[in-house]
Image (cartoon, helix red, strand yellow):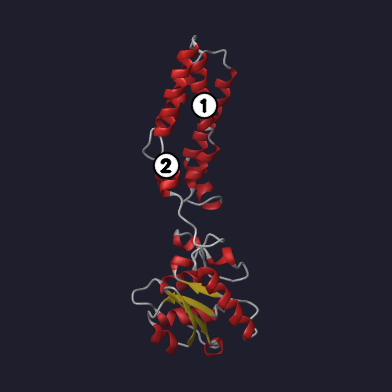
Amino acid sequence: MREAILQAISSYRIFFGDGIYLTLGIGAVTYLAVKGKGDQKKHFFLGFLLLFSFIYLCPFTAHVIMEYCIGKNVYWRMFWIVPVTVLIAYMFASMISCLGRKWQQCIAIFGICLAIMQSGIFIYRENFSERQNRYKLYMEIPVICDLIEEDAGKYGITEKGLIVVNDLTAQIRQYDASIRMPYGRNALRNEKISKRASDIYAAMNEDPLDVNTLVVKAADGKYQYLVFYKEAYREELKRAGYELIGDVGNYDIYRLDLERYSNTKL
């Protein structure tokens, strides 16, 4: 339960960051708390916030949500259901309505807009980059998937299993959802995955590469294809039964001889 509370606090910091957005939100809640009794919206907002705070901070409910609903690493998304933006807008609109003159309201609106703009960062600076292709994926992804599709058709492989380096894990199935993979972003986030997937992930990230474990677990799970960094461990992978079928950019693409390991157990 202590871990759940610490994770809740950490998620709170992740969501609000270090800008003044949090200050504005706290200011809005404070404004509601001291506002006149006749405002019905006050009771709705404050009641909702109290209920949310209880669910979010209560060790039991936090544990259930983290373990069985959305996961620990994205617990901060709980704040999406808090109408922080609405609260801030309501606070500012209410304050502006109390000003009697138009010029005062105009100055207040300008100051508010300036405060809001200063509360964040320019979105196009850090969150966007020029796309490399119309799929908005790494340029190697379509080539890798098409090469695997062509090779699978040549050898009559109907179920394509693929293991890739971490760089490509989250993008392969965005281009070709018919490709089966042992894990996705869940492994990168240290979330719970199957024993076989965990062994493959550990082998792929071992330094040096754990070729023996990788090849046996890959064969056991019928993951015929492998994408690894170009020329890295190429000879070791070939000796283990992988055949190089192509390369693109910084990556080599291999196919595994599953028959060679059909009766092998690790």
Q: Residue 91: percent from the left, percent from the top?
A: 49, 22
Above or below for 59 versus 254: above
Q: Residue at x 49, y 10 (%)?
A: 101
Left or right: residue 8 versus residue 221 is left
**Circle 1 is placed at which residue position?**
89
Nearer the N terminus, badge 1 or badge 2?
1
Residue situated in front as seen by the camera: 132 or 81: 132
Residue situated in front as seen by the camera: 99 or 48: 99
Tag 2 secondary structure: loop
Q: Label for residue 122?
A: 2
Above or below for 41 versus 234: above
- Residue 226 visible to an observer of this rendering: yes
Tag 1 secondary structure: helix
Image quadrant where residue 178 sits: bottom right
Q: Residue 85: percent from the left, percent from the top?
A: 51, 32
Q: Residue 241: percent from the left, percent from the top?
A: 48, 88
Q: Residue at x 47, y 18 (%)?
A: 106
